[in-house]
Image (cartoon, rainbow, N blue to C red):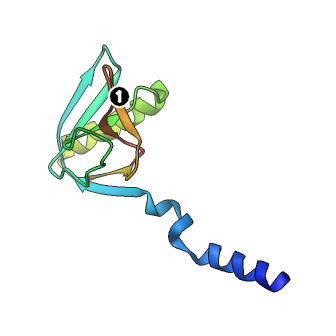
Amino acid sequence: MKKYIFILIAVCLSSNAFSATNYWVDTTGKVLNIATYATTETVLVFLDNNGQDVAECSDKQAFAISNTLSSEARARMYSMLLAAKTAGTPITIAYTKVGSCEAWGSNNSVYRRIMRLR
């Protein structure tokens, strides 16, 4: 019995099926445009690289800084994007392959939600 449990644990730990990296996508590009919306408190970002599509998200061009983040977190992301745009340097946006779409109006699945910037 211990042998079977050990084998099961070894298989699970060595498998990439449970790895968070299977769900993350990185897209690197230069910032073309940043649009801010006071009504929704959402920031949209357009890169020169549209990145990978997320099936659940209807928009395939923009990325969104979510209005559900704290104002401090949004400000840090916005600052990084402005710095990258001003300097003309590429920035890497991380988002997930499944879900994590940012709502817009009555539609819950519009923009790919930015999870991390580097």
Query: Which residue is most to the bottom?
Result: 3
Q: Residue at x 51, y 59 (%)?
A: 20
For the point 17% across and 52% down, the residue is 49
Check disc 1 and give the amino acid type. Answer: Ala
In the rendered view of the protein, which quadrant contains the N terminus? bottom right
Which residue does the numbered mark 1 point to in the structure image? 103
User: Which structural element holds mark 1?
Assistant: strand
Q: Nearer the viewer, residue 48 or 77?
A: 48
Q: From the viewer's perspective, is residue 106 above or below residue 51? A: above
Q: Is residue 94 left or right of residue 6?
A: left
- Could you say where residue 35 lies in the image, as x and y percent from the top left? 21, 28
Answer few, some or many: residues within 10 Å of disc 1's Cα (few below 14, many 20 plus, some between 14 and 19).
Answer: some
Q: Residue at x 80, y 86 (%)?
A: 3
Name the residue at the right extreme.
Answer: 1
In the rendered image, the vertical position of residue 36 relative to residue 91, given as above or below:
above
**In this picture, residue 22 sits left or right of residue 31:** right
| x then y, percent, for residue 84 | 25, 45
Q: Is residue 26 above or below residue 13?
A: above
Taking the image as drawn, is residue 95 in sight? Answer: yes
Comparing 93 with 82, the one in front is 93
- Between 108 and 23, the one lying in front of the other is 108
Q: Residue 108 location, x and y as percent? A: 36, 29
Give 61 or 107, whichever is nearer the viewer: 107
User: Residue, x 52% and y 71% (percent of image)?
Assistant: 16
Picture quadrant where residue 39 is located: top left
* Relative side of 58 to 113, left or right: left
